[in-house]
Image (spheres, rainbow, N blue to C red):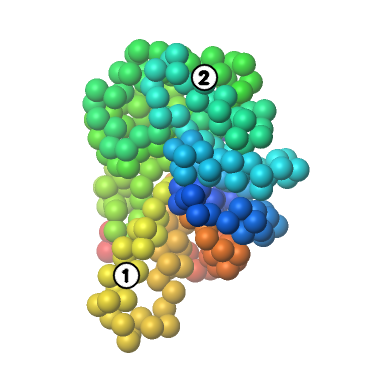
Amino acid sequence: MRYRTLGATGLRVSEVGYGGGRVRGDADPAAITHMLHHAFDLGLNYIDTAPSYGGGLSETLIGRAIEGRRHGLVIATKTKSRDPNEIPAEVEGSLKRLGVDAIDVLQFHGGYIPGDDAPAILDEGGIDAYRRLRDEGKVRYLGFSTDGPSAGAERLVASGVFDVIQVHYSLMYQSTHDMFGDTGLIPSADALGMGVVLMRCTTSGVFPRLMRRSFPTELADIDIDAFLLNYALSNALVDCALMSLASEADATWTNAVSDDVDGRMDLRALHRG
């Protein structure tokens, strides 16, 4: 596994991280623990989750998996609320489920953040609650997640108060980084020293399904998921790409993509012809 520096935080994070968003009620705790331990042994150290994933189950199972192995791991979770009176209780719940004393990256859990959501975070006490938690030592760095460009997301980046952005980006979804014009949320965040963490860089399976249905014979022996992950990691502004690892085999092949630096693409040459 190779590592990159998470923006200006100084944290060294694995190029491939674990995204715990697909943990559901039927999850096998032992299987998740074994898979994560295998991933840790290969070098993965960035873990992202949220209280809403599996109704707290994702945080709980991750907490069990990291017990005794906390050192060197970077743990990120989120809060759904923007209310400064509710945020501390959400964080206390996450700390308890994860079994940790501090969260490395705390993020406002966003979708397409509308323009009227940014004031709730920046002007009505949300970010102040985050800062107090940081001052208390319960949080180290501040961030937010967003599905893509919006007035709210652009204002959050421009505020300069965040350390990390988690955002969509993939071969199919280019709006967060227009490589041709070098514009979008990703270059804007990077210019301010924010760490860039990707979600859905393998398109949540959409592109592989489309290509296999369209070219079942021609692509029979092509690993499309590895191709997509390599595309994302070929972007030098990306610090970590989250993957919803479901097995030890997933941890192994994603680690192999990270290690295959000779396979990286020149995205600027590709996009600018």
At x 38% / y 43%, what residue is drawn? 167
Q: Which residue lies furthest to the bottom in this view?
A: 217
Q: Which of 7 and 78 is in front in this view?
A: 78
Sequence-first tag of 1 and 2? 2
Relative vertical location of residue 178 with respect to residue 118 in this rendering, above or below: below
Q: How crowded is mark 2: few (under 14 residues within 10 Å), some or many (20 or more)?
A: some
Secondary structure found at label 2? helix
What residue is disc 2 on? 88
Q: Which of 123 and 245 is in front in this view?
A: 245
At x 36% / y 63%, what residue is drawn? 205
Side of 223 relative to 185 (left or right): right
Number of numbered discs overlaid on the protein picture: 2
**Residue type pointed to by label 1:** Arg
Q: Which residue lies furthest to the right in this view?
A: 68
Q: Nearer the viewer, residue 7 or 30?
A: 30
Q: Distance between the residues labelled 1 and 2?
A: 41 Å
Which quadrant of the structure image shows residue 62?
top right
Q: Residue 209 carries which label?
A: 1
Q: Residue 269, can we see it?
A: no
Q: Are marks 1 and 2 in contact (CB under 8 Å)?
A: no
Which quadrant of the structure image shows residue 208?
bottom left
Point out residue 215 in the picture as x, y percentages from the top left corner.
Answer: 28, 81
Secondary structure found at label 1? helix
Side of 88 relative to 126 (left or right): right
**Residue type pointed to by label 2:** Pro
At x 25% / y 77%, what residue is drawn? 214
Point out residue 21 in the picture as x, y percentages from the top left corner.
Answer: 46, 47
Q: Residue 120, can we see it?
A: yes
Point out residue 134 in the picture as x, y percentages from the top left corner.
Answer: 57, 20
